[in-house]
Every structure is written in C-alpha cells, then in structure tokens.
Image: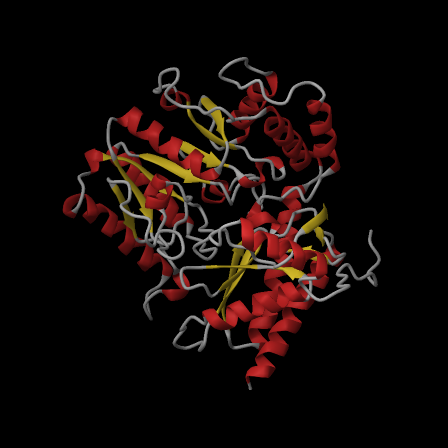
C-alpha cells in the first residue's frame, strides 16, 4: 500500500516545459489543427494511473485515454504478453492466414457478454468501425434500412457513425451530407426534465414518442435497429433508468427491430459490471466494444446472436487489420486482469469515493448543478445558476485547464460542454484517487474565489 503522505503529482517546470514546447512547435507545423489535445504536453512514460511527460512532470490521469485504460497504463501482464507475441508474428492478417488469439478472444467474448444464447464475434480496429459494421449486419439480417439513435449520443466520427452522433460541433459541422436513413429520438436527461415531471413520467412520454415516430416518420417495419449507449459518454454521462432501457428493448421486440448496445466507452468494468447493459437486465441483439478492451491497443469487436452475425456472407465484413494478434493477446490479458484482480469491484469502490466527494463539493459550490454516474464512470455538471440550470461552459473549461495545469488530467463532456467527467484507470490507488480529487476541489475553490 502506498504511503498516505506521498505526493504523486510532481510538476518540475511550467506546462508546457521546454521539451514539450519544442515538440508543440513541430506539431503545429506538421499536424493539422483538427485533432484536439487536452493537455499541452507530450507523454514520456505511463504506469498505472500516472503519466509522466517529456519534461519530467508527473500527472494523475483521470481521463484514461477517454476510457481506454481501465487496466491502466502499461499493465505488466499485458506488456509481457505483447513482448512474447512480437517474437512469434506481428500480423499475418486474419483474412490470409488465421491465428489462434483471434478465435480465443471471440470465444471469450461470446461467453462473457450478456445472454445465454449462441453468439459470434468478429474484430475491427476502432469503436466507429464496430458501429458501422453492427449497422451493416443489422441491415443485412433484417432487410431493413432505417437506424434510430438518440440525441446526445456519440457513436464515432466516420460517415455513418457521425450521422448517428448527435452533437453538431465539433463532430458534424461542415462535414455533411450525412448517411441517409438515420434518425434520432429523445433520450432521458432527468436533471433537465421539465419542472414537476418525475423520471417515470419522462420515461413513459419518451417511449410514447418512439411509438408515435413509427406513425409520423418511418414505419417500424422499415427500421433495422435502434442503437443506444447504455450510459451516454460524450453526451455527459447521462444514466437512464432501467424502465427506459427495458422499454426500448420491448419496443424493439414488438416490431422485430434489433437492439444494438454501444458499449465502446461503458464496457470492460467501467460501470461496476463487465458491461453496462447488465445493470438494466437487458440482453442486446448486437453489442459494440472497443476502448478498454486491450489496454490501449487499437481493436474493437462486434458480438451478436449467431444467426444475426451469420447473415453476412464471406468477405462482406472484415478489414485488413481487424483483430490484430497484438490486440487480441492484449485483450485476453486484460480480461484475465478483470477476472483475477477484482477490477470490477474496484470500479464500484472508485465510483463511491468520487460521487461521495462530488456530492460534498456540491453542498459547498452552487455551480455544481448535478452529480451522477455508475461505477467508476462519474461526472459533475457545472451551471451558472442552480435554479435556472443554465450551463456554464466557460467556467467548466477554466476548471479543466487549471486541473490539468496542477497535475490532474480531466476532460469535459456534454452537449453544452459543461460536464467534467472522470475515467480514471481502475488500477488507481486510494492515495492517487484522493490526491486527484483534492486537486479538483482546490481548483473549484480557487477559480470561484477569483470570480468574486
């Protein structure tokens, strides 16, 4: 156990330091401005929940590569497995000569994912690719074209995934036209419900609107699938009720529509279950996964009912680098860590600590309008006024920037850009977690005092 007196954050220079500044100048010259960066420095080393930059500054990482590092930076078991694999072969391409890790990982995911029915899995490179292929499979199986997603949902940046995504800026502005036969429905946001409307009332109303949508916009018999994040990630960590998620699933079953669970950010222990859908007692027809599946290596998966997955003929789905041996080997080790090192239980403990601290802060700072989360997927929402709930994007940005400057890496989220989200690795120690939360609270105090 780490000493409670040890400080993990070590800031040796201003940020960016001289080495980072030199690299920033090269980056500005050689890399387009489109790819966004949270912290203006460059990584030198990562270990567990800590990141050290090229100038020797050590940060506590509460972003986890946007939820890609549930197993932490450079987990030793994964690193060792990768080194061993590198001595065998790097990438013969599964479509040319197959390899065992691909099949072993598919078998494992078929066993782990919700539902006792027969399943099949195949692999790709990114979350967006998984979403695109899940939609392709749903259309192939059903013979239908329309796909319904939800407002504030995020499903990726490729054309179809971007079309399913809700937030216009920065993801969609100027990039149209978008893929046809994609539609969006309302998703519950209980904090911003109309005054006097209880969550169960809101759920009923939204589900009623979905039924009406089949009368007013697209008939149900032309809808191939509804795709849903069990908890909206980029949308602001919005947690729906079990009633709502089950209601959507029931509507899908009623009309022969496939239910796609986008678990790209919520999967692999993040929410205190291996997959977030387990909280809602709903078994999806298809599931997309990526991010924390392989400790940061690029790999994604689509798992689904065997008869649905087999609707595509040989050659109709796949990709040259899909399911790389390195990604598969890493993923198998990550799953082993999840099962043997108690990381799912750890997610719940982390979440309890974060939410408890955030609620205490909420009592002190009126700008914290809402605190929410599930497992270690936690967030707070910043507003100008707790009564009007007007979002405060500017204050949120200043808090995030100051946290990063003081050595705690956090990121924003939400349709209004006013949510601070926490996605720390599940291997974070109690001491690192407490130090990081202490920094966040001190930033709130200092920034708000400056505003007076």
Q: Nearer the viewer, residue 431 or 128?
A: 128
Residue 101 sits above or below residue 341 on the image: above
Q: Where, quadrant-wise, is the C terminus in this rendering?
A: bottom right
**How far from the left and from the top, in percent, is residue 111?**
54, 26
Q: Position of residue 149 (x, y in %)?
A: 33, 45
In the foreground, 201 or 275: 275
Q: Residue at x 17, y 39 (%)?
A: 219
- Side (left or right) of 105 relative to 238: right
- Looking at the image, which residue sits at the far front? 29
Q: Which x, y percent locates residue 259?
A: 35, 36
Seen from the viewer's position, the closer of residues 71 and 345 is: 71
Residue 143 can be seen in this image: yes
From the viewer's perspective, is residue 71 above or below residue 16? above
Residue under the image location 79 percent in, 62 percent down: 7
Give the farthest residue toward the top: 97
Residue 98 drawn above or below residue 177: above
Residue 285 appearing in the image: no
The residue under the point 45% across, 63% down is 417
- Residue 17 horizontal side relative to residue 154, left or right: right
């Amino acid at each position: 156990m780490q000493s409670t007196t040890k400080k993990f954050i070590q800031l040796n220079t201003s940020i960016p330091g001289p080495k980072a500044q030199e690299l920033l100048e090269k980056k500005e010259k050689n890399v387009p401005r489109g790819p966004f960066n949270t912290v203006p420095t460059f990584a030198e080393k990562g270990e567990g929940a800590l990141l050290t930059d090229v100038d020797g500054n050590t940060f506590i990482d509460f972003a986890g590569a946007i939820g890609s590092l549930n197993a932490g930076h450079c987990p030793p078991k994964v690193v060792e497995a990768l080194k061993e694999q590198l001595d065998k072969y790097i990438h013969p391409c599964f479509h040319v000569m197959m390899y065992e890790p691909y099949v072993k990982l598919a078998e494992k995911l078929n066993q782990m994912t919700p539902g006792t029915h027969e399943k099949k899995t195949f692999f790709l490179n990114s979350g967006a690719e998984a979403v695109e292929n899940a939609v392709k499979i749903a259309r192939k199986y059903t013979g239908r074209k329309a796909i319904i997603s939800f407002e504030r949902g995020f499903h990726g940046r490729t054309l179809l995934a971007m079309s399913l995504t809700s937030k216009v800026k920065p993801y969609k502005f100027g990039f149209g036209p978008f893929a046809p036969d994609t539609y969006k429905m309302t998703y519950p946001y209980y904090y911003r419900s109309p005054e006097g409307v209880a969550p169960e009332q809101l759920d009923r109303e939204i589900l009623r609107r979905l039924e009406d949508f089949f009368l007013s916009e697209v008939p149900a018999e032309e809808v191939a699938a509804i795709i849903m994040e069990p908890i909206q990630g980029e949308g602001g960590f919005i947690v729906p009720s079990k009633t709502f998620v089950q209601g959507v699933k029931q509507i899908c079953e009623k009309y022969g529509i496939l239910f796609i669970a986008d678990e790209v950010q919520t999967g692999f222990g993040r929410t205190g279950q291996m997959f977030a859908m387990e909280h809602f007692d709903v078994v999806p027809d298809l599931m997309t996964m990526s991010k924390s599946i392989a400790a940061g290596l690029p790999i994604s998966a689509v798992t689904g009912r065997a008869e649905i997955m087999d609707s595509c003929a040989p050659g109709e789905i796949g990709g040259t680098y899909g399911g790389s041996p390195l990604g598969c080997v890493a993923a198998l080790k990550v799953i082993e860590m999840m099962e043997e090192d108690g990381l799912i239980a750890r997610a719940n403990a982390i979440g309890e600590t974060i939410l408890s601290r955030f609620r205490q802060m909420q009592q002190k700072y009126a700008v914290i309008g809402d605190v929410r989360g599930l497992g270690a997927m936690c967030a707070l929402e910043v507003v100008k006024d707790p009564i009007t709930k007007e979002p405060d994007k500017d204050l949120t940005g200043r808090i995030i920037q100051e946290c990063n400057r003081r050595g705690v890496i956090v990121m924003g989220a939400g349709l209004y850009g006013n949510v601070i989200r926490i996605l720390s690795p599940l291997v974070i120690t109690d001491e690192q977690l407490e130090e990081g939360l202490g920094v966040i609270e001190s930033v709130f105090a200092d920034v708000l005092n400056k505003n007076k």
